[in-house]
Image (spheres, rainbow, N blue to C red):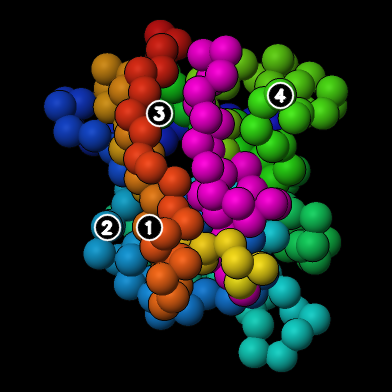
Amino acid sequence: MQEEVALATVGDGSSPLLLGLISDTHGLLDSATLRAFRAAAPYAIIHAGDVGDKSKKQRLSAAKVLKELRESTVNKMVVAVAGNTDESASNLPSFQIVVVWGIRILIVHICGFPPKISSEMQQLVDATSPQIVIFGHSHMPGVQWHNNILFVNPGSAGPRRFKLPRCMALLYLHSSGEADVRFISVGESLQDVKGLPEPMMQFVSPRR
């Protein structure tokens, strides 16, 4: 089983801890994405896979994408997993577990929203017992509460796919167990704004 990453929280827990959520950059990390993260100043960033792309000109490797993202965080920290297109040299794990205030967050590239979850993925969820699952792959941003688990796909901040928005998300975690998800457009078209999911606030029970 993958080792857990425990984020050292600061303060007395009266203020939420902010995590940046991003996925499917595919080696494209433009100024709009970096500006959005620097303005939000997240404590750390979670990348749900398909990080780099060395096969195309003017695209960045996974290592370079993650380095740029680290500079946009307060704690200089990025937790990332491998996507189906990431080069093997990236040495990224297939999934990660992050723990904040007892709240377990499962990060994996391919998952999907319930009930469209594979049996293999359901086994991973059952084995890791998360309160939040963050995933990517489809480039379709969304958030869903199902069986006491919050599923979040931040969408793709990389190359545009069809008419899907280019976006990322912010996750505010409260020590009380409240999770607040908000989506941010990093594209320039009206579709990037109109295609964003509504924010969601949900109580996720922390494990003490």
Please report contact status of discs 1 and 2: CB closer than 8 Å, yes or no: yes
Other-residue count near label 3 (Cα within 10 Å), few / some / many at <14 / 14–19 / ≥20:
some
Q: Earlier in the sequence, mark 2 or mark 3?
A: 2
Residue 151 lies in the magenta-colored region: yes
What residue appears at the point 41 percent right and 12 percent down from the top-left corner?
205
Q: Which is more toward the observer, 96 or 139?
A: 139
Q: Furthest-top residue in view?
A: 208
Closer to the camera: disc 2 or disc 3? 2
Task: Judge left or right: residue 154 versus residue 208.
Answer: right
**Secondary structure category for the residue under label 4:** loop
Q: Which mark is residue 184?
A: 1
**Image spot of residue 32 (x, y percent):** 39, 75
User: Magenta part mainly helix, strand or loop?
Assistant: loop
**Image spot of residue 101 (x, y percent):** 36, 23
Which residue is identified by label 2?
Answer: 40
Mark 2 to mark 3 CA distance (whole Å): 19 Å
Closer to the camera: disc 1 or disc 4? 4
Of the 4 image quadrants, the one containing the C terminus is: top left
Mark 4 to mark 2 CA distance (whole Å): 33 Å
Q: Earlier in the sequence, mark 1 or mark 4?
A: 4
Q: Earlier in the sequence, mark 3 or mark 4?
A: 3
Q: Magenta part of the protein: which range?
A: 135-159
Task: Judge left or right: residue 26 versus residue 102.
Answer: right
**Secondary structure category for the residue under label 1:** strand
Which residue is identified by label 3?
Answer: 100
Task: Judge left or right: residue 151 versus residue 187.
Answer: right
**Image spot of residue 93 (x, y percent):** 72, 46
**Secondary structure category for the residue under label 3:** strand
Q: Which is more toward the observer, 152 or 71?
A: 152
**Image spot of residue 168 (x, y percent):** 46, 56
Which residue is identified by label 4?
Answer: 115
